Image: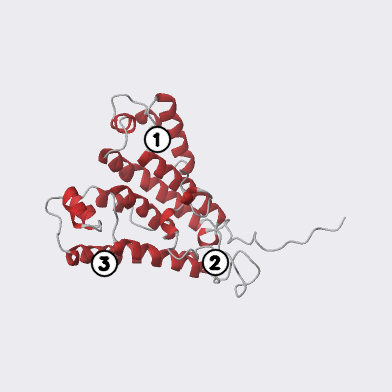
Amino acid sequence: MTDPMAADGHHALKWLASDDGSVDRSFAAGLDSLRAQQRHLQQSLRDGFQTRTEVLEWCHAVDVVSGGQTPETWHEDLVKDRWEVACLMAETDDRIAICDQAPRDDETADAFRRRLIRKVLLPAFQDATEMLRERVGEFSDEEGVKDAERIQYVAGRPRLHQRAVEQHGMLRRTLRDPPGVESEVMAWAEDIIHMTEGHVRSGFIEDVLDRHGNWWHSLTRGPSVRLEWLLAGEIFPAMNATLSELVTNSNELADVAGRAKEVPPG
């Protein structure tokens, strides 16, 4: 069955969707739309997750709506700490399955989630807002703000949105069905370089194709916690650096493509 969240670019970021189906109808400018997405991600965290995979996908969505302003190692620090990952699970049984010492009570888990919001999410969201405010504050995808019916791109930035969708799609595929043979692994590594715009370290492809290395073993053996750790430790920071660069790129204007354009005479 086709994943409805991946059916088009706007919905490919699973955790940016809203429960009321109104994600396509924002009557606000780019910054207000971004704020709504940030609040939705905070609520998703407070509600808790069902799987470790959901946690990693959510982490990337946080990076996107913070414009890459989250700390470089926060993904790795989080996913490598079993107790912290367990605190993000909605159900007590799922917490205990991840970590024997995980809190049984919801109050302790919720306290950790609130601390994560305070220490990581809110500072990153504030930094993103300060960086974007002069560029997207009054832009929407249609003429003016009052009658806007659609905010199509994250923060009104089409190139940022394009890269975010590519990154998120690659992350979802890798977590569920990683490459299994050499040709697929090579293509995967090339795609990683493309979607991070070269922010991965030099020698990345050689390490990935080393049949005695951690990357090869983790990719070709299928989904695993070790693969999640490698992604969080190396790929997430590269993706984050790309997002941050796109946010600060003065050549990237807020989108006005949705506005009606007159046909030139002749």
Q: Which residue is mark 3?
A: 114
Please provide percent x and percent y for residue 84: 21, 55
Judged from the image, the secondary structure of the residue bearing numbered disc 3 is helix
Label 2 – label 1 distance at C-alpha: 43 Å
Judged from the image, the secondary structure of the residue bearing numbered disc 2 is loop
Please provide percent x and percent y for residue 241: 42, 50
Q: Which residue is mark 1?
A: 202
Contact (Cβ within 8 Å) of mark 1 with mark 3: no
> What number is the disc on residue 36?
none
Q: Residue at x 55, y 63 (%)?
A: 151
Q: Which residue is mark 2?
A: 25
* Outermost residue to the left: 101
Label 1 – label 3 distance at C-alpha: 37 Å
Q: Is residue 184 above or below residue 240?
A: above
* Outermost residue to the right: 266
- In-image side of 130 versus 175 (left or right): right
